[in-house]
Amino acid sequence: MILRSLLCSKRKVQSRLTASLADIPSVLEKDVWSVDPFVLDRDGHLIAHRYQTNPPLVNTQLVKTPEEPKSYKDLLQERWKGKIADGDPVITSGAYTVFVTLMNQGLVDLDFLRALGKQDIRFFTGTAEVVRAVAKGEYPIALLGPLVNTKEYMDQGAPIKALTMQEGTVVQVSTIAGIKNAPHPNAAKLFVNWVMSREGQAIYTKPLGIFPVRKDVEAFIPPAGKVTGKLISQTSKDMDDVTRLFGEQFLVKLWKK
């Protein structure tokens, strides 16, 4: 049996529920990974098998190339005040996911988040609404542009583009695991071995339009959705911090007071 997108980061729970997949041949391949399969768990109880990015998104008819933000700090420019859309931090955790990781990496700080909150961000109830607003030209910039919501618009030729930021692009991984003491553990290992192989990654990521974790497999997404440069993978600590700060409504207090 397979658990997909199991995001629990507590080792005791992992070892009680899941079996280590660290000895699977495809996972042990060297120099083929754009994202480390063991990024969330060095013992192999959680294997990263695909990832998602949430870079800023611009409407290319409203933001010309020379004006595009190159760094998250560029979003603090006066020209963008009142022109940035994002999901409401009361109900969506996207901003936490990106900025907690950047803070833990020392790439942004609390002063930056305070200043960003003064940019009069227009909050929507969900990321799909944010992407729609930018695609239709209602706002020039989305603070976060998740691929899952942008691909449909990009496929239709909407004038939107994901930005590559100097700090890097935060990667949110989805993980796969095998149930401990399952009746057919080798079947699970065979399946995961295929999922992590070059063939498996190429076949199953294409219809979903998602990023494979192997760099020898093409990401089947529109060119406008691709980013270059450094990928910053979330760690278990980042995810724990996101859970805690979202529960404390940290960005709500900072941005919506």
Image (cartoon, rainbow, N blue to C red):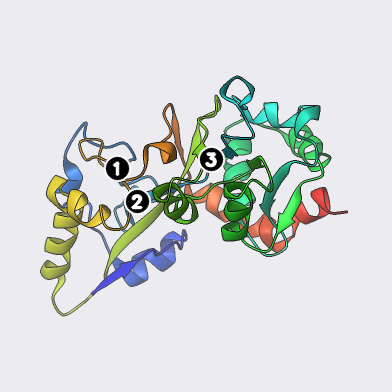
Q: Identify the residue at horizontal 35%, vertical 57% (top origin).
A: 175
Query: Where is residue 199 drawn, in percent x and y?
Result: 12, 49
Disc 3 and disc 1 in contact, CB within 8 angstroms: no
State which quarter of the image contains the C terminus: bottom right
In terms of depth relative to the viewer, which is nearer, 201 or 155? 155
Specify the amino acid type for callout 3: Pro
Residue in the image at 44% along x and 61% along y: 7
- Quadrant of image for the N terminus: bottom left
The answer to whether mark 3 and mark 2 are in CB contact below 8 A is no
The amino acid marked with disc number 2 is Ile
- Secondary structure beneath dot 3 equals loop
- Residue 151: x and y in percent read 42, 51
**Residue behind mark 2:** 210
Classify 10 Å Cα crowding around label 2: few (below 14), some (14-19), many (20 and above): some
Q: Residue furthest right?
A: 257
Determine which of the numbered discs, if any, sits on residue 55 in the image.
Answer: 3
Residue 241 appearing in the image: no
Q: Are marks 1 and 2 in contact (CB under 8 Å)?
A: yes
Q: Nearer the viewer, residue 120 or 107?
A: 120
Find residue 80 and report its horizontal and vertical position in percent.
75, 34
Residue situated in front as seen by the camera: 13 or 248: 248
Secondary structure of the residue carrying tag 1 is loop
Q: Residue at x 38, y 65 (%)?
A: 14
Residue for badge 1: 219
The residue carrying pointer 1 sits among few (fewer than 14), some (14 to 19) or many (20 or more) residues within 10 Å by Cα, namely some
